[in-house]
Structures are given as C-alpha cells and as structure tokens.
Amino acid sequence: MNVGASLKPFTDRVVTCGNAGSTRLFKDGLGAAYLMGKAAAKTALFQGVSASHFQEDYYPVYHSLIIDNRYGQFLFTVTDVYRKNRILTEGMLRVVRREQQGPSAHRILSSILWNMFTGNERYKNIFPKALDIRMHGNLLREFSQVLTRRSP
C-alpha cells in the first residue's frame, strides 16, 4: 500500500512506478502505474536510462501526479468537514437533490462529488469547479434553510 510519494523515484537505470513511487489519492493504482510505466518506458527507449534522462522526461509525469494528489487532499479535507457537520451535510445533500431535478449542465456539486469518488477526473480539474460562485450561493441558501428548519 502506498503511503506517500517516493522522494527519489529514479536513479541511473532504476525507476519506480505505481505503488513503489506514487499513486493517485483514493483512486486506481493501475491507472497511475500505467501512466508512470508509459513515461518510464518512453524515456528509456527514446532518451536513455540515466538519472538525468528520467529527470527530464519521467519526472514531469511523476510530479504532476503528486501535484494532483495535493489538490485531492484539499478537496477531501473539505468533504470531510462537510461530512462531520450535520448542517453542512444536510445542506449539501439538498443542493445535490435540487441539481438532480434540473438540467445536467447545472449539476456542479453533483459533478464534483461524482468525479471525486469515481476517479473519472483529475483532482486538479475538479478544483476550479469547486470555486463556482453559483454552487456556493446554492449551498449558502440551503444551509440557511437547514438552520431555520424550513423545508425546500
């Protein structure tokens, strides 16, 4: 089980892939292993197998995975805050229920949650959607209704 990214994922003629190096936070290890394995193989075949070759061609792929995981850690931290607070959880669920009744183009929170928990999208791509002002307005409206115990 991967517990963190390797500080030195390569050296001359050696490169770590998948769980030995880093994997996508709460996502498919096979997908990460495939991405890193492909980058390592491409580097070895077309550039060489020295540490400098891996630094130039493999490390950007490896590093992008680490950066994506940082976005994921932030998103899951926020999700945990919502999950641990009854008012926030209830308000979020009310927003999701309302979104499901409308057109799919307006399902911002639903899309965020779906992509976070299924692995369909990189966390880095989910993050900007989490800043959507309309979604936050909907959340604030639902939070206030939950606090005042008004029904939807």
Image (cartoon, grey):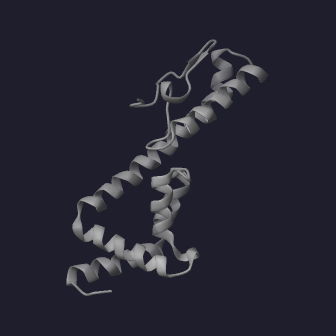
Q: Quadrant of the N terminus?
A: top left
User: Can residue 47 be spotted in the picture?
Assistant: no
Q: Which residue does the image show at 69% across and 15% down from the upper left?
A: 49
Outermost residue on the right side: it is 46
User: Can residue 30 be spotted in the picture?
Assistant: yes
Residue 37 in percent (x, y) is at 63, 28
Q: Which residue does the image show at 66% across and 25% down from the upper left?
A: 40
Q: Quadrant of the C terminus?
A: bottom left
Q: Which residue does the image show at 34% across and 81% down from the upper left?
A: 141
- How many numbered badges does the structure rendering display? 0
Residue 51 in percent (x, y) is at 63, 17
Give the left or right position of residue 25, taking residue 11 as reference: left
Residue 27 in percent (x, y) is at 48, 44
Up the image or down, 147 lies above or below 82; here it is: below
> Of residues 62 and 117, which is closer to you in this image?
117
Give the left or right position of residue 150, taking residue 61 as reference: left
Up the image or down, 37 lies above or below 80; here it is: above
Residue 116 in percent (x, y) is at 47, 55
> Of residues 93 and 48, which is closer to you in this image?
93
Q: Which residue does the image show at 60% across and 29% down from the upper left?
A: 59
Up the image or down, 19 lies above or below 95; here it is: above
Specify the quadrant of the image occupied by residue 54: top right
Give the left or right position of residue 58, taking residue 26 as reference: right
Up the image or down, 150 lies above or below 125; here it is: below
